């Protein structure tokens, strides 16, 4: 069973509907027993980095997630803000500590070299991906849907795909059992459903 973690930020129902569409058994929960019993976890998210970390702390989810992900090595997929919370530091009108799961990583504001490009970055973009289980049977330049103003910056070895917005930016990562996408697979139609299915079935 997949548990979609409800911490008060994110389109959890959209993720649940996408998983249901591919025949996956999933629930939305922030209960400790559900997280412990899950085969895999999904941390979605839309909104501010600081608020996301605050909500995780207030729900006492950080110690549980640290144990399940870092100790037990349970697979987790972070989506948009959910992926960004995996970093060490977030720079968003201040400096905030993240979960610290990805070493030497930060979340920073997108500054495209073309000043005519709008922020937030909203819309469909082609991604260029490396060979990775999330992208199995997907074209190397698959299109996904983005909505964000910040991006994850980390070591090249952890980046599994990028997109170009007058500059190359991270669109997905993997660090062992930790996976993340900046784009929203649940809103990315056929390609997004395939990516979610790859995560569920791996």
Image: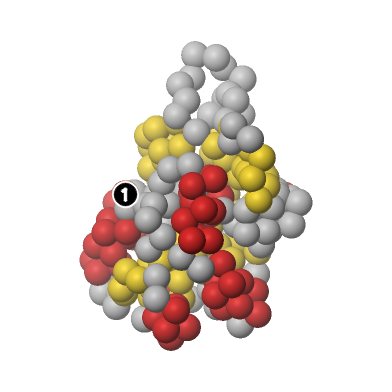
Between 123 and 101, the residue placed more toward the observer is 101
Q: Residue at x 62, y 59 (%)?
A: 99
* 197 sits to left or right of 52: left
Q: Residue at x 39, y 32 (%)?
A: 122
Image label count = 1
Q: On the rendered image, what quadrant is the N terminus found in?
A: bottom left
Point out the residue furthest to the front here: 58
* 18 sits to left or right of 55: left
Q: Residue at x 28, y 64 (%)?
A: 16
* 15 is higher (above) or lower (below) than 96: below
Q: Residue 175: horizontal and vertical position, in percent?
A: 65, 64
Q: Residue 5: horizontal and vertical position, in percent?
A: 41, 66
Q: Residue 155: horizontal and vertical position, in percent?
A: 74, 50
* 11 sits to left or right of 76: left
Q: Is residue 138 visible?
A: no
Q: Secondary structure at mark 1?
A: helix
* 96 sits to left or right of 134: right
* 27 is higher (above) or lower (below) than 92: below
- Which residue lies under the disc numbered 1? 187
Display coloring: secondary structure
Q: Residue at x 59, y 36 (%)?
A: 92
Q: Is residue 148 visible?
A: yes
* 158 is higher (above) or lower (below) than 123: below
Residue 37 position by quadrant: bottom left
Mark 1 is surrounded, within 10 Å at the Cα level, by few (under 14), some (14 to 19) or many (20 or more) other residues, namely some
Point out the residue furthest to the top here: 116
């Amino acid at each position: 069973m997949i548990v979609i973690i409800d911490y008060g930020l994110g389109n959890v129902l959209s993720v649940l509907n996408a998983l249901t569409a591919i025949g996956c058994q999933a629930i939305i929960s922030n209960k400790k027993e559900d997280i412990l019993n899950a085969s895999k976890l999904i941390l979605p998210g839309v909104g501010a980095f600081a608020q996301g970390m605050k909500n995780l702390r207030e729900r006492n989810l950080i110690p549980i997630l640290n144990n399940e992900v870092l100790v037990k090595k349970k697979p987790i997929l972070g989506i948009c803000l959910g992926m960004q919370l995996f970093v060490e530091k977030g720079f968003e009108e201040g400096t905030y500590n993240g979960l610290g799961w990805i070493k030497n990583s930060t979340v920073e504001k997108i500054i495209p070299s073309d000043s005519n490009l709008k922020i937030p970055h909203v819309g469909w973009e082609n991604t260029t991906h490396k060979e990775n289980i999330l992208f199995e049977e997907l074209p190397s330049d698959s299109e996904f849907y983005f909505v964000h103003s910040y991006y994850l910056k980390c070591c090249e070895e952890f980046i599994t795909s990028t997109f170009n917005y007058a500059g190359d930016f991270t669109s997905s990562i993997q660090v062992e059992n930790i996976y993340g996408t900046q784009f929203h697979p649940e809103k990315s139609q056929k390609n997004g459903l395939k990516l979610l299915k790859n995560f569920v079935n791996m």
